[in-house]
Amino acid sequence: MLYFNIFIFSFIFNLLFLFIVKRIINYLSFKNFSDEMQIVQILKQGMVGMSVYTNFLIILLFTNKVDKYVYGIVLGTTIILVMGIIDDVKKLRFITKLLIQFSVVLTLLLFDIRIKKIGVTHLIENAILNIDYYGVLLTVLWVISILYIIEFKKNMENIIYGISIFITLILFSVSILFNDYITLIFSITILGSCLSILIYSFRYPDIKFGHTGIQTLGFTISLIPIISINKTNNPFYIIDNAVILAIMFLSILLPVFDREKK
């Protein structure tokens, strides 16, 4: 019942958040605030990222004791959100964005939030290897890979909706089969957010993810296995997570191939 309530809360909260921000944008426009005003641009480009960010942190704080892991996740997610907002307002250079993303991963590492042991797959639970500080490199590669794969789908909102929902459904199914309650909680949290964004887009099809939405969504997805590792002592399953990366990567290539055929 708890998991169902979390899903319903995530869905309703995210939907209400988007409608409220839309009303604020309309109010500012009605009051003759120019669309070029930074506050309007921030709200337009950042509303999706802000809704995902707020919803994710509410569930994080509600379901976890506030400790160093929670502090690290809150700080890292906040840096990603602020970076996305700045990137939407004035385009950040690639190297600047990369350095900020590395600083976010460094923030996680400073709070000892990292991959500490690996496994082959959920289906072979006994094949587990402690990798100690080699997990630092794997943590960096995992988070940065997710962020840049999803970044390539900028301006392909329908694909972002679909692939995010599909991945969270996979994580949701795996977490039920193997009793991973942490993955279950955060997969349904992001699933609720994505479904509410999808439904909202039917009413307002001009909604944009912006860099704020893309980076925040990608970062929260990348955090799911890392939170599970640090809260339940589960390993990072190489094959399972490689499949997630492969699905995200293929979701980029397929539209490109379709365009080339046409």
Image (tube, helix red, strand yellow):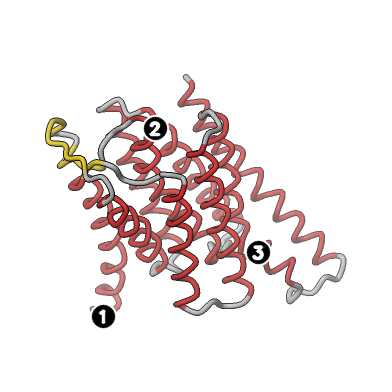
**Mark 1 neighbour class, 10 Å CA radius: few under 14, some 14 to 19, many 20 or more:** few
Residue behind mark 2: 231
- The numbered dot on residue 209 is none
Upstream in sequence: badge 3 or badge 1: 3
Which of discs 2 and 1 lies nearer the camera? The answer is 2
* Residue placed most toward the observer, 143 or 186: 143
Give the spatial CA distance, label 2 vs label 1. 45 Å
Left or right of residue 71, residue 39 in this image: right
Provide the secondary structure element on which disc 2 rests: helix
Upstream in sequence: badge 2 or badge 1: 2
* Amino acid residing under circle 2: Lys
Q: Position of residue 110 (x, y in %)?
A: 45, 50
Going by the picture, which residue comes out furthest to the top?
1
* Amino acid residing under circle 1: Glu
- The numbered dot on residue 44 is 3
* Residue placed most toward the observer, 133 or 38: 133
Provide the secondary structure element on which disc 3 rests: helix
Upstream in sequence: badge 2 or badge 3: 3
- The numbered dot on residue 260 is 1
Q: Position of residue 28 (x, y in %)?
A: 81, 63
Q: Residue at x 68, y 61 (%)?
A: 43
Left or right of residue 23, residue 56 in this image: left
